[in-house]
Amino acid sequence: MTNISKRPAYSYIRMSTEKQIKGDSLRRQLVWSENFAQRHDLELQDTTAFADIGVSAWKGLNRTKGRLGAFIELVRDGTIPSSSYLLIENLDRLSRTTPLEALDLFKEILKLGITVVARGEYGEEEIYTWTSINSNSNQLISTLSSMLRANRESERKSQIIREAFENKRALSRKGVKTNQRPPHWITATKIAKGEFEYSLNDRAPLVQWIFERSADGVGFDKIARDLNARGEATLKPSKQGWFHTSVANIITNRSAIGEYQPYEEVDGTRIARGDPIADYYPPVVTNDLWLRAQKLPHRNRKGGRAGTRFSNLLDGLTSCTHCQSRMYMLCNSRSSKQWQYLVCSGNFRKLTKEVEVEGVKQTVPICTDGTARFRYDLVEQFILDNVMEFGISDHMRIKKADAELKAVDEAIADLSVKLESLRSREQRLLTLVETENDDEIPGLLTALKSRTKERKEAEEQLTTLTHDRDVTMAKQKALDPASAIEVMREQWEASEDDGIRYGLRVRTNTAMREVIDFITFDSIEQTYTVILFGGLRAYKFPNVKFVKGPIKVTPMVVDLTRFAAEMPSHFDIHRADQAGKIPLDPKRRLVNDMLVRKRMKSAS
């Protein structure tokens, strides 16, 4: 007997606000999708996989940033079969943009081979295909009418919202407190519909302390480090601690002296509307203190984009040897020249962590050893001058890309075998659930849930690996002698155009990430070490701070090629995570051991 698999169906659910979940909308859409799939012998997939909750379709965000866009891309790359059904409660869930824009989106989905099913105003079900929309003029006209109606309804609602906010701004100027989201040091208490009462909360003393420190001449960076050392929570919950910008935003915020600036959001950008309203909030500091904090210049910091020359060419590659925190770019003024240094961010920002000592939790600094400063311009110069691999031929780079591609292919093959086994075991459990006694079902369901979770995790890993393979292949195809690092260096040094220099340095940073695994900075030894090609080669440089005239250094070089068979593959290297830390892996330990032995041999 031939087993004919059912056609898959996917339910697309969209709600403009999360509040709609509390109503009947979500349940209604899910029940209809399940009933339709059952009546038409379709295999309904995860009903919440393509749900855009709190995503508006008026500006098309569900296509550009939402799950609808993800669905289309998965159909395009073949992950979702083009023969699938897409179930939508109503066409206005798909798009509320202008009729022609909505039609373009609708055509894009149908042209991929997807069958779209939508319910009408009175509950009737309409089935759309690329063939039907082209051959049935009535269906095309009714579709356009529906799209026009959805767009006009959204436009009407938008106008109502704009008028409501304009009314709130007008009331605010008459003294009515309408803002329900004041600064974090103020608590809003509702006293009537749309009206609030404000009072300073327990964060106000912290804000006052920050202003006093700034008025005393303490820089924003130093204030942030002191707050981190005290373990002080940020005003807006964050695990990243305090930064220069965190303090600067408080100091420059005129809400601290009671002002309120009404805003309006236009195309995702907040635009100030009218003059600030004085005496709106309870002031947390006096006008005098606020002014004294503003007048003191903080010349040790420059904000904005990374300059006109992409200052840190080593961005994403550097870490502290002692705590694995990322290295932080620091600018210090000396005479008329601005010197830049790399410092351990964990030590410089005085970050702390909790440890348990004999059952007692204690707060200790993340890094006490990473105190040295490494002059950035010399670090960049020495690395570019001495790392010979930056001039490698395309032949070597292609060999490296081939090795990476082979490793990914092997990982995909292993994971595919594992996934097939998991699917078989999951199917066997499903069969048992259908045939076993009721007493056995709870245990089987628990096992099935666990197996399903393993299978989904394996599928996610396979998706990631497949993406990595596509990226590696793209890089392999893009190999070009003109993109060599030393060629780009010559070009940016010769160019007088800031835009060209910036672009070349950005491309160089990307190319360096392909060659360099990591650069580790040792404050105790006063050295920094560049590790390349999966740990096969290392360059160790001294920390030179003060020079007069041109200078050249000869780094200590360790060639680990003969140890390649004993070392982990290139794909075992851990890149910097979100916290900016690089774990100490076996490769790094091996490199450090080799450098120590070589130094001892040289000394003897």
Image (spheres, helix red, strand yellow):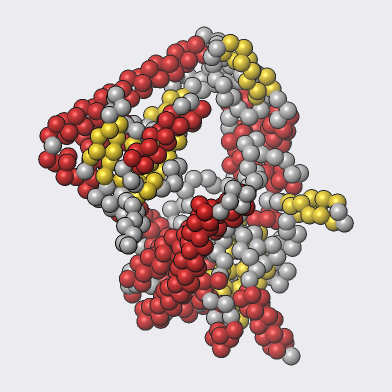
Above or below: residue 20 compared with residue 219: above
Foreground residue, 475 or 417? 417
Q: Can residue 226 be seen at all in this image of the molecule? A: no
Pick the quarter of the image with the C terminus: bottom right
Q: Can residue 522 be seen at all in this image of the molecule? A: yes
How far across and down, in percent of the image, does residue 545 sit?
Answer: 63, 67
In this rendering, position of residue 73 left or right of residue 332: left
Foreground residue, 147 or 565? 147
Identify which residue is drawn at 48% across, 15% down: 168
Identify which residue is drawn at 41% across, 48% down: 45
In this rendering, position of residue 40 left or right of residue 424: left
Q: Quadrant of residue 399?
A: bottom left
Identify which residue is drawn at 87% across, 56% down: 358
Foreground residue, 567 or 558? 567
Foreground residue, 92 or 595? 92
How far across and down, in percent of the image, does residue 433 sit?
Answer: 53, 53
